[in-house]
Amino acid sequence: MTCLPLSGFATRAIHAGYDAAAHDGALVPPLHLSSTFVFESAEAGAEIFAGEREGYFYSRIANPTVDLLEQRMAALEGAEAAVATASGMGAIAGVLWSFLQPGDEIIVDKTLYGCTFAFMRHGLARFGIRITHADLTDPANLSAAISKTTKIVYFETPANPNMRLVDIAAVAAIARRHGARTIVDNTYATPVLTQPITLGADIVVHSATKYLGGHGDLVGGIALGTAADMQQVRLVGIKDMTGAVMAPFNAMLVLRGLKTLKLRMAEHCRSAVAVAAALDAHQAVAAVHYPGLAGFAQHDLARRQMPGFGGMIAFELTGGYAAGVAMMNRLNLVQRAVSLGDAESLIQHPASMTHSTYTTEERREHGISDGLVRLSVGLEEVDEITADLMQALDAVTAARVSVDA
């Protein structure tokens, strides 16, 4: 382990868990592509398998490059341990399969990423697990819904795609009193802005594909929590149930991304504040959902829970879905693509893309309107991002005026 003081976030993101002297002085951690590892003796192999001796034996269980990423992410999230997975959904599925069985209940917030929603409502529910939705923006709703069979309380904050926030500390305290684990998807905020475990959450999950990697060139996930919980996830949810193991090469890419995470998040936040204000002032925009706006319903909670408001914005046009499509099709710099947290600014339509796993009725019930547009503000010059959005909105406004005339 490095002997450097690791108190600062950026320092931990660059150095935690790695000692160059132990790797022939290599500044950059080596990439271990081996699927299996040689034992010095049969006895040593038996001891490693039994957990009586440290060492690696098969990369589906542990790999040195992946292990370094897990150590570094645990240091950033304030967790005891972490498990890296093949995707964000791999992390979510691996965690939930590790702690749920038929007859258990999981209480989830009204708004979830589309694939998470589908996994729970159309997946877990088929195996006798009760999925209960509650509006967790008010902790009192959790107190009213929680029961003896509740094993997990799960939510995203900010939520994908409509930016709803949940008071992590308040919800986690209620769950703990009832013996339930609190699991938080921290993909939007990243540990730069929010560290849910320090606020009382038991487990944190990420899509490492997004801000952690930051360059749109990998797919991966991370789960974090106590050492005991992560051992359960590693040996049950990942090794036996899903096999959703992160590849060492992808772990190397995430490690690279972490080195600039704090810098990138600061720029994403600065630019998003300016873009959100410009959108909010445009006559073609009916509503902007961004925690950094003073008019955002949960702005005070955002100020308490997030030292920075993130790079994600949701907004709706006065012309609804048709206007949103017309606006997106006129963009030049901002790219029409799903995913988020990349250097490039990305825009997409949740109802027909990332959240199409919801039925029309389910989207209406869970607060995802057909006209909602999701924008991931990238790292381009903010005035150029804004100019591209404004020209597209101006064109939509002009077209509507022409039709009305």
Image (spheres, rainbow, N blue to C red):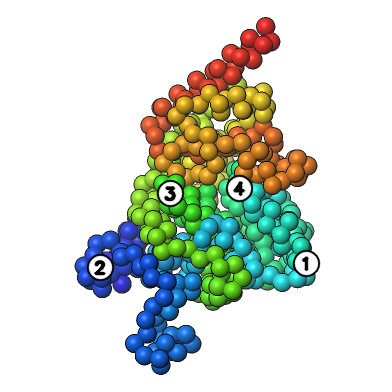
The mark nearer the N terminus, 3 or 2, is 2
Disc 3 to disc 4, C-alpha distance: 24 Å
Circle 3: residue type: Asp
In the picture, which quadrant includes the N terminus?
bottom left
In the picture, which quadrant includes the C terminus?
top right
Residue that badge 3 annotates: 217
Residue that badge 4 annotates: 159
Residue that badge 2 annotates: 20
Q: Are marks 1 and 4 in contact (CB under 8 Å)?
A: no
Residue 356 lies, in percent from the top left, at 68, 43
Disc 3 to disc 2, C-alpha distance: 26 Å
Give the answer, above or below, for where 165 lies relative to 404.
below
Circle 1: residue type: Gly
Residue that badge 1 annotates: 128
Q: Residues within 10 Å of mark 4 (few under 14, many from 20)?
A: many
Q: Residue 283 has which mark? A: none
